[in-house]
Image (spheres, grey):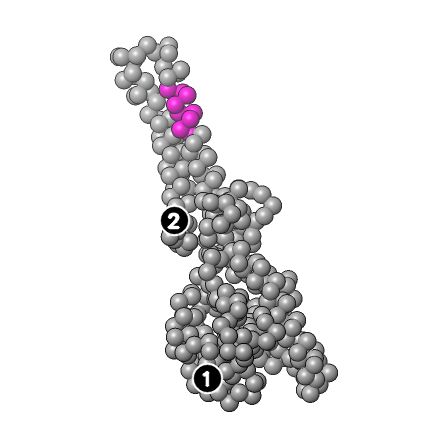
């Protein structure tokens, strides 16, 4: 298995080392300039003075040239890290730079180009959600996500009518403790919300349309996420809707287990508290319906 995680601090230290090495090289170059006469006097005893420039100067020129290159490259790379400008494919200075916050990025291996490294930033992930149609989005560490096993009791009341009738809902989705452990194996979560205007609080058709819109937006985000991360967990609002009628209703095995999507609540996440932690509102005004989704990743 390839370890996809590269410590950003170590990467930064490598560039600092290159910068310092270049500066030291230039310093030694200037020092050598002052020591030229003593060195020349020493070389006179063993080497013809007339050919010394052809021996020494090219070497000095190459050393100084490499030193300048180290300083320039180190400075540029450090500036790019600080300002958050990177090439997504590792091809150098091209037009596919991703803007990111200082030291808030993820370094992953590109599955399409072996050995290439690109940076996927929190800012870029959020932008992906907004561009897809989400109202707001936020990246949070999973250790801050509020989990509560007692939320399972709300599912058991079965107000939605999906309890025991959808494999992605309780109890078919699995034990609450196991699901929480599974979610916590991921380091971060991209949380997003959609807000849709409806006629009134009895506009159930509008709510269904809003949920369908939310699913379509989630699909767009998923298209981006699956290109960036090898393993992740997608969570949505409400029941899994991959099949028009879940196979559990017919007492058959799940038809598409690799596509099944559970809800945040099924994983015992307190969504109202999570919304606050993500600088979002759980309710966004009169005659609106708000849905939440998330992608957990490493």
Rendered position, 269 above or below 50: below
x, y (%) of residue 121?
52, 57
Q: Residue at the spot x=45%, y=34% of the render? A: 68
Residue 13's disc number: 2
Q: Earlier in the sequence, mark 1 or mark 2?
A: 2
223 or 104, nearer to the observer: 223
Q: Mark 2: which secondary structure?
A: helix
**263 on left or right of 31:** right
x, y (%) of residue 259?
53, 66
Residue 238's disc number: none
Q: Residue at the spot x=39%, y=67% of the render? A: 185
Q: Quadrant of residue 28?
A: top left
**Contact, mark 1 vs mark 2 (Cβ under 8 Å):** no
Q: CA distance from mark 1 to mark 2?
A: 47 Å
In reply to whether residue 208 is colored magenta, the answer given is no
**1 on left or right of 76:** left
Residue 152's disc number: 1
Q: Dot 2: within a 10 Å radius of its alpha carbon, few (fewer than 14), some, or many (20 or more) residues?
A: few
- Dot in front, 1 or 2: 1
Q: Quadrant of residue 291?
A: bottom right
Q: The magenta stretch spans which residues?
A: 56-64
x, y (%) of residue 210?
66, 75
Figure disc tally = 2
Rendered position, 83 above or below 51: below
Q: Dot 1: within a 10 Å radius of its alpha carbon, few (fewer than 14), some, or many (20 or more) residues?
A: some
Q: Quadrant of the C terminus?
A: bottom left
Residue 18 visible in the picture: yes
Q: Main secondary structure of the magenta part?
A: helix
């Amino acid at each position: 298995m390839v370890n996809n995680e590269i410590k950003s601090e170590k990467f930064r230290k490598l560039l600092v080392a290159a910068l310092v090495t270049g500066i030291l090289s230039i310093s030694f170059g200037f020092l050598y300039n002052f020591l030229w006469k003593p060195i020349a006097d020493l070389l006179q005893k063993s080497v013809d003075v007339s050919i010394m420039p052809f021996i020494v100067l090219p070497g000095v020129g190459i050393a100084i040239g490499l030193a300048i290159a180290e300083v320039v490259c180190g400075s540029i790379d450090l500036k790019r890290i600080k300002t958050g400008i990177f090439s997504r494919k590792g091809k150098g200075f091209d037009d596919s730079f991703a803007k990111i916050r200082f030291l808030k990025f993820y370094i992953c291996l590109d599955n399409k180009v072996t050995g290439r490294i690109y940076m996927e930033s929190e800012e870029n992930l959020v932008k992906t959600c907004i561009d897809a149609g989400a109202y707001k989005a936020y990246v949070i560490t999973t250790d801050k996500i509020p989990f509560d096993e007692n939320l399972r009791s709300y599912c058991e009341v079965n107000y939605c009518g999906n309890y025991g009738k959808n494999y992605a809902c309780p109890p078919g989705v699995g034990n609450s403790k196991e699901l929480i452990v599974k979610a916590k194996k991921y380091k971060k979560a991209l949380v997003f919300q959609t807000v849709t205007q409806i006629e009134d609080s009895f506009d159930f058709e509008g709510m269904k349309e809003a949920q369908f819109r939310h699913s379509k937006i989630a699909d767009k985000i998923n298209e981006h996420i699956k290109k960036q991360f090898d393993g992740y967990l997608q969570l949505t609002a409400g029941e899994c809707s991959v099949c028009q009628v879940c196979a559990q209703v017919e007492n058959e095995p799940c038809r598409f287990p690799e596509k099944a999507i559970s809800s945040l609540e099924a994983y015992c996440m307190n969504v109202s508290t999570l919304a606050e932690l993500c600088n979002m509102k759980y309710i966004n005004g009169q005659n609106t319906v708000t849905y939440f989704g998330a992608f957990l990743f490493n």
